[in-house]
Amino acid sequence: MSTVWSVAKTYPQPAGGFIGISDFEVVNTDYWTNIDTDYKKENMDYGLTGMVVDYLSRFLLNGEDVRKAFDISYKGAKIAETIFGFTNALKIAEILGEIIIDLDDESIRAAYQLAAFDLFYRNPTEIVDYRNLKPSKVTCEHVRYMVMRTHRFFIETSDIKKLGFTFDGGYTEKIGAGDGDILTEDTLWDIKTIKNNPSEAQYLQILMYWIMGQHSTFDCFNNISKIGIYNPRLNKAYICEISKIKEGIIHEIEKNVIGYGQAYAAPVKNTQIATNTFAVIDIETNFMDQVISLGVVIADKTNMHELWSGYYIVNSLYETPSMYGNMLFLENIKEPIIDSRPNIMAIIKNQLEAYGTDRLLAYCGKFDYDRLPELSNYSWCDIADIAAYKQYNEQIPNNISLCATGKIKKGFKVSDMMHYLGEINYTETHNALGDALDELRMVKLLGLDISIYDEAFINRKRPSRREYVHPAKMHPKKPGYYSFEQAYSLLASYGMSKEKIQALVDEGKLSSIKEDGVLYVDSRETISIFNRL
C-alpha cells in the first residue's frame, strides 16, 4: 500500500502531465527578497527541511501550539517506543517540543530532531538518528526566513480553516496514507520548499488531495474550489481553479491513479452501516514480539455477516523468525497487502472509519490491544471473556470445571471453544486473517447480541458482569438425589448424552423427583449406570 506522494511520483502521466504550470496562476511574493535561501548551502536532508518548514509554519499559524504542529512526530515517537523499543522516545519528544519556542537556532535544531520521529510513523525503513541532526547556522537562517515568508503569506492573503488534515474515508486499498498542509476558505494548499517550479508529479499530488477530500468523510472539503502550492524558498504561490480542469482528467485520476470504482476502492459513506458494525482483529508476531501480520474483518452487528476483510503483512518484518511464519501465505486465504506498518494502520483506520466501526473484538484481546497502540482509541472487547464463561456460553459442557465466576478453569483456547460450539474438527490456522474469520464465526455461534460484549471491555469501564448461578447439585431434603445437570456432568465423559439420560428417566430406569423446576435423579441408580458402562 502506498502514500499519495509515492503514487504521484511513479504514475506514468500523459505527455505534459494531467495538469501543469499552464493551468496555474503564478503569484510572486516579495517577502524578504534580499535573503538567499539556496538549498546547496544547507547541510540537512532536502525533504526533512521541507517538513521542518511546514511544521514550524503551522506552529506560528496555530498560536504556537507545538503539539498540534508536530502531531505526527509525537505519534511517531509513541510508535518508536511501543513498537520499536526506543526507550524514552516519548519523553525525548516532549523535551524537544519544550525547546521549540520561537524561530531561534536552538528551536530550529530541536524542530529537526523532533521531526525525525515522523519516519517511525511514515516510513520506518528510512529512520534516522535524531542525535545526528545538527543543522548549520546557514540552514537555520534559511529555515527561519522560509517559515517567516509562509506565515506572512497566509496571514495576509487567507482565512485559515484547518492546519494539517487527512482524508479519512477517502483512502483506498491502493492509497492508504497521505496528509495535506493547509485549508483556507476555498483553497487546499501544500507547502513545497523546492528549488524550481513544481513538477508534474507534485501538481498531480495536490490534485489527488482535492479528489480524496471530496471522497472523504469530512465536510471541510465541500467548499474547496482551488488548489494551491506555496513555495517560500522561491517566494512564489501557484493557484489553480478546479473548474478549469477537464472533468475527464479528474475521472481518470479517480479511477486509475487513486482506485475509486475498482474492486478495491474504499467504501463510500453509508449511514446505515455506520451505526451497525463491529470488527474482529487478529495479529501474528515474531520472536521479538513485533507484529508481522494483521487480519481484520468488519461485520454487521445484527446478523454477524462479513462486510469487508483485509489481510496485511509488515514488509520489513515478515521474514524475521516467528513461530507461525509458514502460515503467512495460504492458498485459501486472500492475497495479503505487503507494506509498511504506518501505511497498513492508515488503511485499517480508514476502513473502520468508512464503515463507522467503533468496536474491535479479539480473542484474548489484551495481547492484540497492547501491540496495536495506533488503534487504542477504539472500544476493544475480549471474545474470550464471553466465550469462556458458562453464563454466556451454554455450550460449555457441564463436566468442565468452573471458577466461582462461571469461567472455565483451564482449556479455553480458540480450538477448545470451537469444539464446544459444535465444530469438533476445527483446527486453528495461526494465520491472522484466517483466525479473525474464525473468531467472527465463534461470535456468530455464540448467538449473543453485540451489546453483551460491553461486559468484556479491555480499555473501557465494564458494567457489572452477569452473575453466574451455580446449578443445584443435590436435593436439599432427599439424600442421594442429584440434579439432572449434575448427573449429566458425571455421565457425559462416558458418552452419555442428555437425551439418553432423559430417556432413562422417562422409561423409569432412573428414579427422579421434580421440585421448584429442578429435576433430581437417584444417585444410586446413577452409580449403577456408571458400573454398567
Image: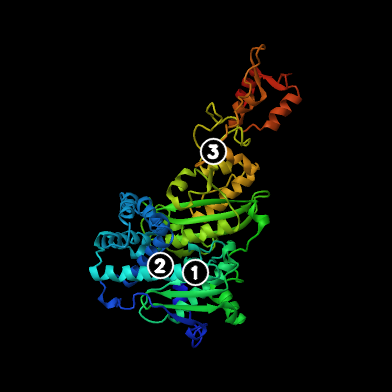
Q: Residue at x 62, y 37 (%)?
A: 395
Q: Nearer the viewer, mark 1 or mark 3?
A: 1
Identified by mark 2, the residue type is: His
Taking 328 as reference, is 398 left or right? right
In this view of the protein, which residue sits in the foreground, 269 or 445? 269
The vertical placement of 247 against 481, above or below, is below
The vertical placement of 41 against 74, above or below, is below
Q: Residue at x 53, y 71 (%)?
A: 187
Q: Position of residue 204 (x, y in %)?
A: 49, 77
Q: Is residue 264 visible?
A: no
Give the image's coloring scheme: rainbow
Quadrant of residue 153 in the image?
Answer: bottom left
Label at residue 385? 3
Mark before the other along the chain sequence, 2 or 1: 2
Taking 426 as reference, is 292 left or right? left
Quadrant of residue 141 in the image?
Answer: bottom left
Label at residue 158? 1
Alpha-carbon neighbours of circle 2 within 10 Å: few (<14), some, or many (≥20)?
A: some
Q: Which residue is mark 2?
A: 151
In this view of the protein, which residue sits in the foreground, 54 or 518? 54
Taking 361 as reference, is 342 left or right? left
